[in-house]
Image: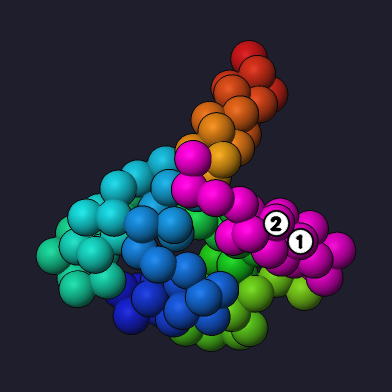
Amino acid sequence: MYHRIKMVREALQLSQREFGENVGVSRDVISNMEYGRVRPKELLVKHICDWYGVNEEWLKTGEGAMFKADAKNNKKVEEAMSIFRSLRPEYQDYALEQIRRLAELQNK
């Protein structure tokens, strides 16, 4: 699974920092997962799949397509990531904080 996490990140053209921030972990955690030093917890795997539209079966086993067939969700993620990448770093921090707050509200 370790190399497939890196494949997803590279396919999305994200740095380890960007990839990790979007799923609530540090760059170091992503690096450690990609090099096989840390096994990702099930919750993090699900979060990666949900956030980036990754096919969970592919991430775990390598079988099937990398991304879910639901193109509508992938397009939303691609649009959000495109907008996010265009922001200055200080606005990216603000946007991430707002997204985290929305996620917390949703989970209540």
Is 24 in front, or is 48? Answer: 24
Report x, y in % for residue 79: 76, 61
Quarter of the figure that contains the N terminus: bottom left
Q: Mark 2 is on which residue type?
A: Ile
Q: Position of residue 70 (x, y in %)?
A: 81, 67
Q: Is residue 68 left or right of residue 19?
A: right
Q: Are marks 1 and 2 in contact (CB under 8 Å)?
A: yes
> What's the residue at 66%, 26% (across, down)?
102
SS at mark 1 in the image: helix
Residue, far right:
72
Residue 78 shown in magenta: yes
Q: Position of residue 104 (x, y in %)?
A: 58, 22
Span shown in magenta? 70-90
Q: Residue at x 59, y 60 (%)?
A: 85
Disc 1 versus disc 2: distance between alpha carbons?
Answer: 6 Å
Which residue is depicted at the point 47% across and 69% down?
14
Judged by depth in the image, the label closer to the viewer, 1 or 2, is 2
Q: Residue 93: x and y, percent?
A: 49, 38
Local SS, label 2: helix
Relative vertical location of residue 86 with respect to residue 4 in this rendering, above or below: above
Q: Residue furthest top?
A: 108
To which quarter of the image does residue 103 belong? top right
Q: Is residue 10 visible?
A: yes
Which residue corresponds to mark 1?
79
Q: Quadrant of the C terminus?
A: top right
Q: Residues within 10 Å of mark 2 (few under 14, many from 20)?
A: few
Kind of residue sitting beneath label 1: Glu
Asked whether 57 falls inside the magenta stretch, the response is no
**Residue 96 seen in this snapshot:** no
Which residue in the structure is indicated by mark 2? Answer: 83
Please determine whether, in this image, residue 15 is positioned above or below residue 83. below
